[in-house]
């Protein structure tokens, strides 16, 4: 369930790999159960993010891990070059295994990262990150 930020909501896109909810300064992803995410099949997501945020609008990426999926962490290295305006990466986990995976994934990122146990806290964190700049 997404927080009610209707003033900041832009649009939801359903892609082959999952659902993506775009807001003024953040994006919430909910990958499909069993998806295998890599740089190539995330390309449509990157194009949408470019459309909404360009390279100058600051934004935070939040992954809401409600489903189990695999992710190639080196994708972060390539995608980081596309988005110099990415200010943070939040991960919402719902079990200990996903929490450990998210902790490992943090080592692949050069932006502030944080793990949350609910989406509301992750969205509140966006305001802290965006105002830092």
Image (cartoon, rainbow, N blue to C red):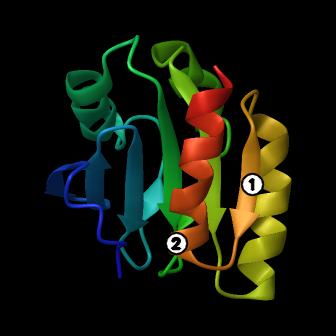
Q: Residue at x 20, y 24 (%)?
A: 51
Sort mark 2 into few (<14), some (14-19) or many (20+) by Cα contacts within 10 Å: some
Q: Position of residue 132 (x, y in %)?
A: 68, 27
- Residue 47 vertical position relative to residue 104 in the rendered view, above or below: above
| Total tally of numbered discs in the picture | 2
- Residue 82 vertical position relative to residue 17 in the rendered view, above or below: above
Q: Residue at x 35, y 82 (%)?
A: 1
Give left or right: position of 40 versus 60. Answer: left
In the rendering, which numbered label is found on residue 120? 2
Give left or right: position of 60 versus 18. Answer: right
| Residue named by callout 1 | 114
The residues bearing labels 1 and 2 have C-alpha atoms spaced at a distance of: 13 Å
Give left or right: position of 56 versus 79. Answer: left
Q: Is residue 72 visible?
A: no
Instruction: State if disc 2 and disc 1 touch (CB < 8 Å).
Output: no
Q: Position of residue 131 (x, y in %)?
A: 60, 30
Q: In which quarter of the view is residue 15 placed?
A: bottom left
- Which sits in the foreground, 93 or 105? 93
Q: In which quarter of the view is residue 19 placed?
A: bottom left
């Amino acid at each position: 369930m997404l927080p009610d930020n209707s003033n900041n909501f832009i649009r939801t896109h359903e892609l082959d790999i999952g659902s993506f909810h775009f807001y003024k300064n953040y994006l919430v992803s909910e990958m499909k159960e069993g998806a295998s995410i890599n740089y190539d099949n995330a390309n449509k997501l990157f194009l949408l993010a470019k459309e909404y945020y360009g390279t100058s609008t600051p934004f935070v990426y939040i992954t809401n891990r409600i489903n189990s999926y695999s992710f190639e962490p080196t994708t972060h290295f390539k995608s980081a070059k596309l988005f110099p305006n990415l200010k943070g990466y939040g991960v919402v986990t719902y079990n200990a295994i996903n929490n450990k995976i998210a902790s490992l994934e943090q080592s692949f990122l050069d932006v502030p990262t944080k793990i949350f146990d609910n989406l509301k806290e992750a969205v509140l964190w966006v305001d802290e990150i965006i105002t830092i700049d």
